[in-house]
Amino acid sequence: MPVQGTAKQPTTELDARYSSALNPRPGAAEVTATEWAEAQRQLEAAEIFWASTIRPDGRLHVTPVIAAWHDGVLYFSTGKGEQKAKNLAHDGHCALTTGGNSLTEGLDLVVEGTAEPVADAAALEEVITAFETQYGPHITSPEGTFHGLGDELRKGDAVVFAVAPTTAYGFGREDGVYTHTRWAF
Protein backbone atom coordinates (compact mmCIF):
# COMPACT_ATOMS: atom_id res chain seq x y z
CA MET A 1 0.00 0.00 0.00
CA PRO A 2 1.45 3.41 -0.93
CA VAL A 3 2.10 6.04 1.68
CA GLN A 4 -0.56 8.69 1.55
CA GLY A 5 0.54 12.28 1.02
CA THR A 6 0.55 14.70 3.87
CA ALA A 7 -2.49 16.80 2.91
CA LYS A 8 -2.80 18.61 6.22
CA GLN A 9 -0.56 21.50 7.07
CA PRO A 10 1.89 20.96 9.92
CA THR A 11 2.00 23.10 13.01
CA THR A 12 4.85 25.57 12.73
CA GLU A 13 6.95 26.73 15.65
CA LEU A 14 9.95 29.05 15.84
CA ASP A 15 12.47 27.84 18.42
CA ALA A 16 13.71 31.10 19.95
CA ARG A 17 16.61 29.33 21.67
CA TYR A 18 18.29 28.83 18.31
CA SER A 19 16.89 31.79 16.40
CA SER A 20 18.51 35.19 16.67
CA ALA A 21 19.42 38.32 14.85
CA LEU A 22 23.22 38.27 15.00
CA ASN A 23 24.53 41.53 13.57
CA PRO A 24 21.59 41.99 11.19
CA ARG A 25 21.92 44.40 8.34
CA PRO A 26 19.94 47.64 8.60
CA GLY A 27 16.36 46.97 7.56
CA ALA A 28 16.65 43.18 8.01
CA ALA A 29 13.39 41.41 8.73
CA GLU A 30 12.51 40.33 12.24
CA VAL A 31 13.08 36.73 13.26
CA THR A 32 10.10 34.62 12.16
CA ALA A 33 9.46 30.96 11.48
CA THR A 34 10.00 29.70 7.96
CA GLU A 35 6.73 28.93 6.18
CA TRP A 36 6.14 25.27 5.31
CA ALA A 37 5.48 26.28 1.70
CA GLU A 38 9.07 27.57 1.46
CA ALA A 39 10.43 24.33 2.93
CA GLN A 40 8.44 22.35 0.34
CA ARG A 41 9.87 24.50 -2.47
CA GLN A 42 13.37 23.70 -1.20
CA LEU A 43 12.58 19.97 -0.97
CA GLU A 44 11.30 20.00 -4.57
CA ALA A 45 14.43 21.78 -5.83
CA ALA A 46 17.13 19.91 -3.88
CA GLU A 47 19.35 17.54 -5.81
CA ILE A 48 21.24 15.79 -3.01
CA PHE A 49 19.90 14.51 0.30
CA TRP A 50 21.68 12.69 3.12
CA ALA A 51 19.88 9.63 4.45
CA SER A 52 20.57 8.73 8.08
CA THR A 53 19.56 5.23 9.16
CA ILE A 54 20.28 3.04 12.19
CA ARG A 55 22.29 -0.17 11.92
CA PRO A 56 21.05 -3.20 13.89
CA ASP A 57 23.86 -2.64 16.43
CA GLY A 58 22.72 0.97 16.99
CA ARG A 59 25.43 2.73 14.99
CA LEU A 60 24.40 5.38 12.49
CA HIS A 61 24.78 5.07 8.76
CA VAL A 62 24.73 8.27 6.69
CA THR A 63 24.94 8.36 2.90
CA PRO A 64 24.01 10.72 0.04
CA VAL A 65 20.93 9.85 -2.03
CA ILE A 66 18.71 11.42 -4.65
CA ALA A 67 15.15 11.95 -3.49
CA ALA A 68 11.90 13.36 -4.85
CA TRP A 69 9.27 15.28 -2.90
CA HIS A 70 5.85 14.23 -4.18
CA ASP A 71 2.40 14.70 -2.67
CA GLY A 72 3.72 15.46 0.82
CA VAL A 73 6.13 12.49 0.94
CA LEU A 74 9.89 12.27 0.37
CA TYR A 75 10.93 9.26 -1.75
CA PHE A 76 14.38 7.79 -2.23
CA SER A 77 15.69 4.57 -3.70
CA THR A 78 18.49 2.13 -2.99
CA GLY A 79 19.68 -1.31 -3.99
CA LYS A 80 18.16 -4.17 -1.99
CA GLY A 81 21.56 -5.25 -0.66
CA GLU A 82 22.83 -1.80 0.29
CA GLN A 83 23.44 -0.93 3.93
CA LYS A 84 20.58 1.57 4.17
CA ALA A 85 18.10 -1.02 2.86
CA LYS A 86 19.33 -3.54 5.43
CA ASN A 87 19.08 -0.93 8.18
CA LEU A 88 15.55 0.09 7.19
CA ALA A 89 14.43 -3.55 7.15
CA HIS A 90 15.48 -3.67 10.82
CA ASP A 91 14.32 -0.17 11.86
CA GLY A 92 12.41 2.16 9.54
CA HIS A 93 13.15 5.33 11.49
CA CYS A 94 15.30 7.68 9.46
CA ALA A 95 16.09 11.27 8.62
CA LEU A 96 16.77 12.89 5.26
CA THR A 97 18.64 16.19 5.21
CA THR A 98 19.43 18.70 2.49
CA GLY A 99 20.70 22.25 2.28
CA GLY A 100 23.68 24.38 1.41
CA ASN A 101 27.16 24.81 2.72
CA SER A 102 26.93 28.52 3.49
CA LEU A 103 27.25 29.94 6.97
CA THR A 104 25.51 33.18 5.99
CA GLU A 105 22.60 32.27 3.70
CA GLY A 106 20.27 29.40 2.84
CA LEU A 107 17.87 26.95 4.39
CA ASP A 108 18.94 23.53 5.66
CA LEU A 109 16.15 20.98 6.11
CA VAL A 110 15.80 17.80 8.15
CA VAL A 111 12.83 15.48 7.50
CA GLU A 112 12.25 12.76 10.09
CA GLY A 113 9.90 9.84 9.61
CA THR A 114 9.58 6.12 9.10
CA ALA A 115 10.62 4.74 5.72
CA GLU A 116 8.15 2.35 4.13
CA PRO A 117 8.88 0.40 0.93
CA VAL A 118 6.67 1.30 -2.02
CA ALA A 119 5.29 -1.86 -3.63
CA ASP A 120 2.09 -0.63 -5.31
CA ALA A 121 2.69 -0.46 -9.09
CA ALA A 122 0.60 2.69 -9.63
CA ALA A 123 2.32 4.50 -6.77
CA LEU A 124 5.70 3.38 -8.08
CA GLU A 125 4.94 4.87 -11.51
CA GLU A 126 4.06 8.19 -9.83
CA VAL A 127 7.35 8.13 -7.95
CA ILE A 128 9.31 7.32 -11.12
CA THR A 129 7.65 10.28 -12.82
CA ALA A 130 8.53 12.49 -9.84
CA PHE A 131 12.19 11.39 -10.07
CA GLU A 132 12.24 12.02 -13.83
CA THR A 133 10.68 15.46 -13.33
CA GLN A 134 13.10 16.40 -10.56
CA TYR A 135 16.30 15.07 -12.13
CA GLY A 136 15.50 15.29 -15.86
CA PRO A 137 18.35 14.15 -18.10
CA HIS A 138 20.23 12.63 -15.15
CA ILE A 139 17.57 9.89 -15.33
CA THR A 140 15.98 10.21 -18.76
CA SER A 141 19.09 10.58 -20.95
CA PRO A 142 21.16 7.53 -21.92
CA GLU A 143 24.20 9.53 -20.75
CA GLY A 144 22.56 10.37 -17.42
CA THR A 145 24.15 9.30 -14.15
CA PHE A 146 20.99 7.48 -13.07
CA HIS A 147 19.71 6.40 -16.49
CA GLY A 148 17.64 3.23 -16.21
CA LEU A 149 16.53 3.93 -12.63
CA GLY A 150 12.86 3.61 -13.59
CA ASP A 151 13.42 0.18 -15.12
CA GLU A 152 15.43 -0.97 -12.07
CA LEU A 153 12.56 0.08 -9.82
CA ARG A 154 9.92 -1.59 -11.99
CA LYS A 155 11.89 -4.87 -12.08
CA GLY A 156 12.47 -4.77 -8.32
CA ASP A 157 16.27 -4.55 -8.66
CA ALA A 158 16.10 -1.45 -6.46
CA VAL A 159 13.58 -0.46 -3.84
CA VAL A 160 11.83 2.88 -3.27
CA PHE A 161 11.21 4.07 0.26
CA ALA A 162 8.56 6.62 1.19
CA VAL A 163 9.13 8.89 4.17
CA ALA A 164 6.06 10.83 5.26
CA PRO A 165 7.36 13.48 7.64
CA THR A 166 6.50 13.16 11.31
CA THR A 167 8.69 16.13 12.19
CA ALA A 168 10.78 18.45 10.05
CA TYR A 169 13.23 21.19 10.93
CA GLY A 170 14.43 24.21 9.01
CA PHE A 171 17.62 26.08 9.83
CA GLY A 172 17.62 29.37 7.96
CA ARG A 173 20.26 32.06 7.49
CA GLU A 174 19.74 35.37 5.76
CA ASP A 175 21.10 38.87 6.35
CA GLY A 176 22.55 37.87 9.73
CA VAL A 177 19.21 36.44 10.88
CA TYR A 178 19.30 32.80 11.99
CA THR A 179 16.09 30.82 12.42
CA HIS A 180 15.22 27.37 13.69
CA THR A 181 11.74 26.26 12.65
CA ARG A 182 10.03 23.03 13.70
CA TRP A 183 7.11 21.54 11.76
CA ALA A 184 5.08 18.81 13.45
CA PHE A 185 2.68 16.63 11.42
Image (cartoon, rainbow, N blue to C red):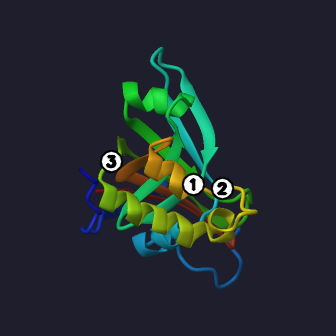
Q: Amino acid under label 1?
A: Leu
Q: Which residue is mark 3?
A: 119
Picture coordinates of residue 46, whole percent (x, y): 60, 64
Picture coordinates of residue 116, whole percent (x, y): 34, 43
Dot 2 falls on a residue whose secondary structure is loop
Q: Which residue is mark 2?
A: 146
The answer to whether residue 34 of the structure is visible from this angle is: no
What's the CA distance linking mark 3 and mark 2? 21 Å
Q: Which residue is mark 1?
A: 149
Question: How would you rate the neighbour count of disc 2 (Cα within 10 Å): few for under 14, some for 14-19, many for 20 or more?
Answer: some
Q: Please tell me which residue lies in front, 13 or 86.
A: 86
Dots 3, 2 in contact, CB < 8 A: no
Dots 2, 1 in contact, CB < 8 A: yes
Question: How would you rate the neighbour count of disc 1 (Cα within 10 Å): few for under 14, some for 14-19, many for 20 or more?
Answer: some
Q: Which badge, 3 or 2, is on the more N-terminal residue?
A: 3
The residue sitting at 55% across, 28% down in the picture is 83
Dot 3 falls on a residue whose secondary structure is loop
The residue sitting at 60% across, 35% down in the picture is 62
What's the CA distance linking mark 1 and mark 3? 16 Å
The residue sitting at 49% across, 34% down in the picture is 80
